[in-house]
Image (cartoon, rainbow, N blue to C red):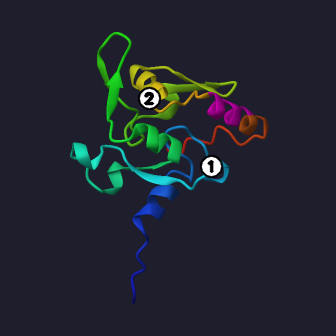
Amino acid sequence: MTKLLVPRSLLVSERAGFACEYCLTHQDDLIMSGQIDHILSLRHGGKTIFENLAYSCAICNNNKGYDIGGMLADGTLSRFFNPRIDYWPDHFEVSDGLIFPKSAIAEVTVRLFQFNAPEQVEIRRFLTMEGRYPGKWPHT
């Protein structure tokens, strides 16, 4: 019997329900196709293993880059939201297209991923009116 190998990228995408695991925008509503992100970048010692991969929109992935965290307003360092260990609703709240942080982790994620860039907010407002945002957090 032949064993069918499923590409790792498809498994990551399916686990996320084809929605960006950072901003929760669904693949169907992205201009560019989703990307596979190393949560902990290879540059920082991360590995290309299922547990370290997240489905990401191009905007979140590009804004995140190789970073693993950022500075809070008080000068302390905080890591970014990690979809493998963090529960999205514990860290973020959405209202009128804006994503509000509820934790230090979310504060740096919202700011550095530029969740609330005007064009992103307008897209989320439109998608919300259409009943397409936010997508269901895939790990409930």
Q: Is residue 100 left or right of residue 48?
A: right
Q: Secondary structure at mark 1?
A: loop
Q: Position of residue 107 (x, y in %)?
A: 44, 21
- Spot the residue most to the top: 74
- Spot the residue most to the left: 45
Q: Are marks 1 and 2 in contact (CB under 8 Å)?
A: no
Characterize the magenta stretch by its predominant secondary structure: helix
Q: Nearer the viewer, residue 27 or 16?
A: 27
Q: Is residue 76 left or right of residue 65?
A: left
Q: Is residue 43 magenta?
A: no
Residue drawn at (38%, 12%), measured in percent from left and top?
73
- Say which residue label 1 marks: 30
| Residue interval drawn in magenta | 118-125
- The kind of residue tagged 1 is Leu
Q: Is residue 120 left or right of residue 128?
A: left
Q: Is residue 140 visible?
A: no
Q: Is residue 20 visible?
A: yes
Q: Secondary structure at mark 2?
A: helix
Q: Nearer the viewer, residue 4 or 37?
A: 37
Q: Is residue 37 above or below residue 102?
A: below
Residue drawn at (37%, 38%), measured in percent from left and top?
85
- Say which residue label 2 marks: 112
- The kind of residue tagged 2 is Leu
